[in-house]
Image (spheres, helix red, strand yellow):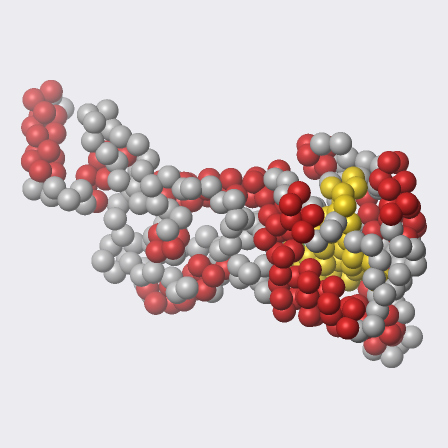
Amino acid sequence: MSASEIRSIVEAVLAELSRNPDGGSARTSTTNGQGAAAPPAAAATAPPAAEQARATASAAPQSPSRAGGTSDGGDIDVPDPDAPEERRRIGVEHPANASGLANLAGSTGARLAVGRAGPRPRTRTVLLFGADHAVTQDAIFGDVPHELLEQFGLFTVQTRVTNQDEYLLRPDLGRQLDDESRTVVAERCVKKPQVQIVVGDGLSAAAVTNNLPQIYPVIEQGLQSAGLSLGTPFFVRYCRVGVINDLNDIIQADVVLLLIGERPGLGVADALSVYSGWRPETGKSDAHRDVICMITAHGGTNPLEAGAFVVEHAKNVVANQASGVELRLKQSGSR
Ligand code: B12
């Protein structure tokens, strides 16, 4: 193709663009090279279930509303991918069954029906993924605020882990209190209570930060009104579930309740779990434990409701003097 032919094509495209000044699909795909076309008129928006399933840590970063400018000084318009209507936008062009696809996408927080630009993901898909991934990083590498722990009178002890990278690489160290913490727990904690409450950061500080204010009072008051004696609560930094054996070797509670941040996902980053067990001690495994999981106001079990459930579960464990598989066997009449 000659240079003059190319120039005439470019001029024709520019003329077409100038007739379309509000920056429709032609402008967008020309400037960003991603074919990030505006959705076709038929494109649907998924129902709110998908939005509800999405939850971010409170420290969610601001998503970029603009991707930047072009070399000629013009802007490339990329709507904020984190806006609810963008997050739920169906990106498949000309779907064979638009309402069926919208229902499917609306039934989950997973990234369904996002469409593509040729063989690649669209710009907004990549931006949204990056924003969600950033939220998980904040959740994992964040710290639970000291003021929050003070609010509930929780003193802090630490496992044998010394920094956040080591926490991820060495789960075994997160299952043991360090020497100083052993002494502190031995000195400060009431021994042999019926129920010991412990809070741990686990894999999501955001889970503790966002849910503790709601769930903790419900659990504490519920256990007290059930007439159960409570131990001295505290917070474990760099905490893994298995630490409940180690700390209960010192405290010797009947039941230990560990409120701990779950591994964040790209949809929900602030879910809390309550792991528990009857008389945890060295040598006991997850088979002796129970977990009430996905406690979050963002598409999981509401923390207030979960707190009431935790209390009922603790009463059940005390009544049966068993937890985990043993509890199931007792309840089914096999033991
Ligand atoms: C990671 C994970 C696993 C990993 C754990 C590996 C590891 N070392 O981390 C693997 C793949 C091995 C696993 C296996 C199982 N898991 Co799992 N797991 C999870 C997940 C995705 C995250 C857990 C987390 O963040 N824990 C917090 C961190 C800080 O704890 P940690 O000390 O690092 O790791 C411990 C816990 O994760 C614990 N754990 C993991 N799963 C389970 C399940 C039960 C019943 C118990 C008591 C403990 C437990 O095992 C680890 C070692 O102690 C959750 C989903 C969620 N929403 O929480 C499901 C989840 C906890 N698992 C679940 C189940 C059912 C199981 C299995 C029973 C599946 C099976 N049928 O085999 C087994 C049991 C394993 C066991 N430990 O005895 C369910 C529990 C449902 C419930 N309320 O009872 C969950 C909620 C998933 C779900 N939505 O169904 N799991």
Image quarter (top left, top right, bottom left or bottom right) of the N terminus: top left
Above or below, comparing residue 12 to residue 255 in the picture: above
Residue shown at the point (78%, 68%) measured from the top left: 223
Please state if 64 lies on the left or on the right of 129 as rendered. left
Question: For this view, does 270 lie left or right of residue 291?
Answer: left
Number of callouts: 0
> Which quarter of the figure has residue 157?
top right
Question: Of 144 and 136, which appears nearest the observer?
Answer: 144
Residue sitting farthest toward the bottom: 333
- Residue 30 quadrant: top left
- Quadrant where the C terminus sits is bottom right
Where is residue 247? Give x, y as percent.
86, 48
Residue 36 location, x and y as percent?
A: 29, 42
Q: Give left or right: position of 85 versus 192.
A: left
Residue sitting at x 90%, y 45%? 187
Q: Nearer the viewer, residue 116 or 81?
A: 81
Residues 121 and 257: in front is 257
Vertical side of 148 occupied by 47: above or below: below
Residue 57 location (% of width, % of height): 54, 48
Q: Position of residue 23 (x, y in %)?
A: 18, 42
> What residue sits 26% from the left and 36% below the top?
76
Residue sitting at the far top = 3
Residue at the spot 42% in from the left edge and 44% down from the top edge:
128
Determine if residue 75 is in view.
Answer: yes
Q: Is residue 89 left or right of 226 when viewed as pictured? A: left
